[in-house]
Amino acid sequence: MEYPNHTFCRYLNLPKVPEDLIREVIDSYPTTKEMAEVSKFKKSFKTTPSGEEYPSYAWSDQNNKKINEWCQKNICEDMYFAFHMIQSDENGYFDIHRDYPVRQKLVYLIDPGGGTPITTFYDEDRQTVLQSISIETHRWHVMDVSAWHDVTGLEPGTVRFAIASRLFPGG
């Protein structure tokens, strides 16, 4: 698939999510160590080069309720919004991936996970760089997640907090 002159991230002028709501939801999440032990959180795991498993992504429908209600009232009533946390690996990296079958997401990055993160989008060969960007926090953006992408430059083991909704689920 070719992406001539394509922008993988487009900012939108939508309302900011209130800080008190964000803080309430973040404080209700477990620490990254507890994340692996809490059964009510849906999670996916990654394996480090040394063979240790760590929880890389977690979300909870219970914690999404307030975020979803605020977003449906202030952003779009026809979408489901989810609050999630993603943990970088021991090298400060989120693996190259694409969010199949989703094509685009509406995202509000709250905390990028420390460091100076760069999101890089790749061609189908997963090596040819098409675009690299530093995504702004506390600003809504549409991201094309159908292309291969990764995130580098994070502090190792830190957590990225965001709100996301699928715009075009694909299939």
Image (spheres, rainbow, N blue to C red):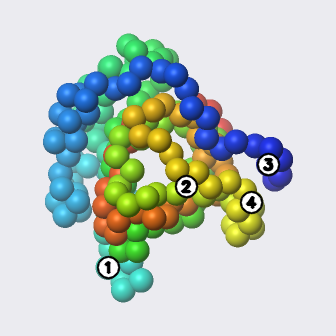
Element type at marker 1? loop
Q: Residue at x 41, y 30 (%)?
A: 81
- Mark 3 highlights which residue? 3
- Mark 2 highlights which residue? 119
- Residue 60's spot in the image, x, y percent? 28, 41
Which amino acid, mark 1? Glu
The label nearer to you, 2 versus 1, is 2
- In the image, residue 49 sits, relative to residue 140, either above or below, namely below
Q: Are marks 3 and 4 in contact (CB under 8 Å)?
A: yes
- Mark 1 highlights which residue? 52
Of 8 and 133, nearer the camera is: 133
The label nearer to you, 2 versus 3, is 2
Element type at marker 2? strand
Q: Are marks 2 and 1 in contact (CB under 8 Å)?
A: no
- Residue 78's spot in the image, x, y percent? 49, 17
The disc placed on residue 123 is: 4
Of 32 and 46, nearer the camera is: 32
Tell me which label, 2 or 3, sits earlier in the chain: 3
Which amino acid, mark 4? Asp
Which amino acid, mark 3? Tyr
Label 3 and label 1: CA atoms lie apart by 37 Å
> Which residue ends up furthest to the front in the rendered image?
116
